[in-house]
Image: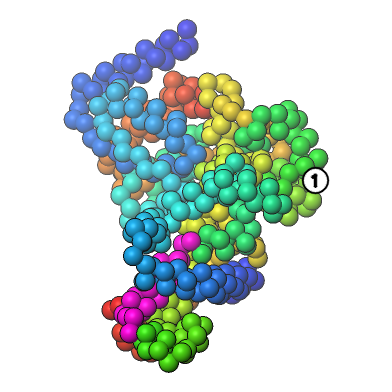
Amino acid sequence: MKTLSYSLLSGLLAFGISASASAEEVQVAVAANFTAPMKVIAADFEKATGHKVTPSFGATGKFYAQITNGAPYDVFLAADDETPIKLEKENGIVPGSRFTYATGKLVLWSAKPDFVDAKGEVLKKANFAHIALATPKLAPYGLAAEESMKKLGVYDSLQAKFVQGESIGQTFTFISTGNAELGFVALSQVFEGGKIKSGSAWIVPANLHNPIRQDAVILNKGKDNKAAAEFVNYLKSEPVKAIIRSYGYDL
Amino acid sequence: MFTDPNIGAIVLTLKLASLTTIILLLIGTPLAWWLARTRSWLKSPVGAFVALPIVLPPTVIGFYLLVALGPNGPVGQLTQAMGFGTLPFSFTGLVVGSVFYSMPFVVQPIQNAFEAMGERPLEVAATLRASPLDTFFSVTLPLAKPGYLTAIVMGFAHTVGEFGVVLMIGGNIPNQTRMISVQIYDHVEALEYAQAHWLAAGMLVFSMAVLIILYTLNPTGRRK
């Protein structure tokens, strides 16, 4: 009943919008880990509203540098909450527009079937040459991986086996090519339709690391862009939340 | 400002560039000689292969190196069978990658110098009964000196500036595979702009100085 009323509501909303106004364009800077869901969400949003969404995918730190140097993005979906908070403090965003659109889940993943067990015991056995993670300084998923290993008491013993990708995308490449036997990536990268796509994985319990909160903001450039405000509202709608969850995020 | 990881990256980068340049001079000399003298149909394909890194984005080279040198790749299976394990995430792996990546910058100037020299000095040396080895060290090398100077400087400098390859196959391990270029990238991404400027400006000054020295010592080097 709840979902029905929501879809009715969003349908009405969409009808009202498409009937009412001229289509606008919204430029969105999107954290790389959110690429897959963003493509689905953008297509749905365009269909529902007639507005055009132009997403750019990349690293959050790079987007920050570009935004502070005048990059023309209206909305920013970051991979963390620190960068949007920083932008907020620097008066770079529309006041009050910051919210958490997804909470990332960390997964220990191997391209080999049966390599990672269901409890992550493989970390203690350490029968591998390389374990990949994203550079903790740069990537929230890398930081969460570091925290988890510390909490499990395996950080010091594994440190010599670390290989670091500059992003979780790079980290995923290290593992999927078999160069690192296993490593920490975002669940959204290896998860589809409610299960792990390939290889073997252990979803790291959320109590082993600080939450990987991903915040969205409307940037100053998008202040008067009606499509930007609508897109952000759309992100908060229940059907979209369901899409985001289906890619392995919490909300 | 100048923290230890930066020093580590600088030392490692200079080590990689020196080693790569030396290896390339050893491999590049016979290769350039062959390319300059051969009439074989293989000249075009081999020359094209040597030139590939000039046109390919470094990330493409890095990606294929990662796949080829990895446990499932042809080279990786060979190195594993020989008992070396796999090369990515090791300094050796970076040397292998850099040798390929910087090859045209060493081979081409030497090849050009050999071609410009012509057959004549070699024939003269032969009529004076110089052995091939003697000819090479007393005639060929001195005549090809500008080419070698360009090759050394460009091979070294190009390896120092390498980014895509070390990003792809390096694994960003401090003091093992984290080069200056990756360190700068990390600083920028982490919003540590002051540190990034330090290293980036250093690279800029270094590159400019290297090129000024090259053009001063070797005014014809570039045109060849």
- Which residues make up the magenta segment? B100-120
Q: Residue at x 37, y 43 (%)?
A: A56
Location of residue B195 in the rendering, given as x and y in whole percent from the top left corner: 53, 69
Q: Residue at x 33, y 53 (%)?
A: A71
Location of residue A22 in the rendering, given as x and y in whole percent from the top left corner: 18, 30
Would residue A168 be seen by someone viewing this image from the given angle?
no
Q: Residue at x 52, y 43 (%)?
A: A169
Of B66 and B137, which appears nearest the observer?
B137
The residue where tag 1 is placed is: A153
On what subunit does the disc labeled 1 rest? A
Residue most toward the bottom? B128
- Answer left or right for B61 relative to B222: right
Would residue B19 be seen by someone viewing this image from the given angle?
yes
Location of residue A155 in the rendering, given as x and y in whole percent from the top left corner: 75, 49
**Residue B143 found in image quarter:** bottom left
Looking at the image, residue A243 lies above or below residue A187: above
Residue density around tag 1, few if under 14, some if 14–19, many if 20 or more, within 10 Å: few
Magenta highlight: main SS: helix
Q: Quadrant of the C terminus of chain B?
A: bottom left
**Residue B153 found in image quarter:** bottom left
Q: Quadrant of the N terminus of chain B?
A: bottom right
**Type of residue at label 1?**
Gly
- Answer left or right for B30 relative to A185: left
Q: Residue at x 56, y 26 (%)?
A: A197
Of B10 and A232, which appears nearest the observer?
B10
SS assignment at label 1:
loop
The number of numbered discs placed on residues in the rendered structure image is 1
Location of residue A184 in the rendering, given as x and y in whole percent from the top left corner: 63, 41
Residue most toward the top? A1
Of B42 and B14, which appears nearest the observer?
B42
Indicate yes or no whether the magenta region holds residue B102: yes
Indicate yes or no whether the magenta region holds residue B118: yes
